[in-house]
Image (cartoon, grey):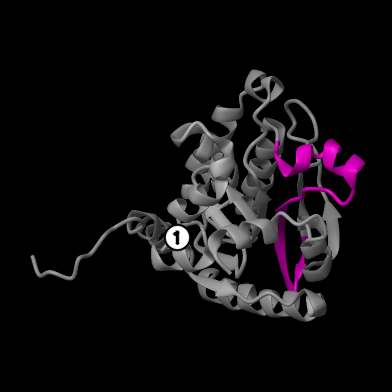
Amino acid sequence: MNAYERLKTVRASDRKMGSDYVNAMFTDKVILCGDRRFGEDPAIMGGIGYLGDIPVTFIAMDKGSDLADRMRKHFGCPMPEGYRKALRLMKQAEKFHRPVVCIVDTLGAYPGAEGEERGQGQAIAENLFEMMGLKTPIITVVVGEGGSGGALALAVADRVYMLENAVYSVITPDGCASIIWKDSSRVEDATECLHITAEDMVKYSVAEDIIREDFENFDVMCAGMRDRILHDIGELLPLSPKKLLDGRYERFRKIGIYDDGETK
């Protein structure tokens, strides 16, 4: 499939949502709500559970299961209180040295006036800043759309994985087409130009690896994801805070470096 076909695939109404992955991968879950400042955002599901026999904090974006649920969750576009809730849970995880596992699937942060009034940009910026210095392992899996800063706010991680048809971009192709060509119908052209596929993300060091999709055997696919994440946690958890943060810093420093192969 080309990039546009992958985009249509991850936008399919019957595709698995963030809550599906949480329910399939984590056991003995406790859901935690609210940002302690404004309220609860159902577009982000967070809490504590067991991944295998290891206690972790999980944070998952969820687009909703039907029209009413999707409207309630703003079609998976989080409000500022959603990002603040996520940060609250991550800081709690740091206190108890629990790994953090994030599931990303969003067009981007909620773009309406309410979000701006409540500090959308600041909430995202705080997550980026705090996650870079969070002294506990962070692993992110992009399972659908990874749209702009709204996705990055849960993806400043030690390891990032992409499902094979997932996409990750600085802007939605629809928004790109509207800005560059003043024509939203050119979304297919924008999709190809943006290099948003999982293969592109691995090529440019944005993601570590691609996870193959098998929704007909969803439990088996999630078991494989769980085993991969547990392997990473086993590598990252024993590291000292300095080594963990140095590795995270270097991971992001190398993104976008272009090497033409010439010796300098």
The amino acid type found where label 1 is placed reads Val
Q: Name the foreground residue: 102 vs 107.
A: 107
Please report the residue visible at 49 percent of the width from the left and 45 percent of the height from the top: 170
- Find residue 164 and report its horizontal and vertical position in percent: 60, 70
70 drawn magenta:
yes
Q: Name the foreground residue: 112 vs 13.
A: 13
Q: Which residues are magenta?
A: 49-78
193 drawn magenta:
no
Whether residue 50 is situated above or below residue 190 in the rendered picture: below
Q: Quadrant of the N terminus?
A: bottom right
Residue under circle 1?
206
* Residue 159 makes an appearance in the image: yes
Please report the residue visible at 71 percent of the width from the left and 21 percent of the height from the top: 114
Please report the residue visible at 71 percent of the width from the left and 57 percent of the height from the top: 58
Q: Identify the secondary structure beneath mark 1.
A: loop
- Find residue 208 and report its horizontal and vertical position in percent: 48, 69
Q: Name the foreground residue: 205 vs 169.
A: 169
> Residue 113, located in which quarter of the rendered image?
top right
Whether residue 230 is situated above or below residue 247 in the rendered picture: below
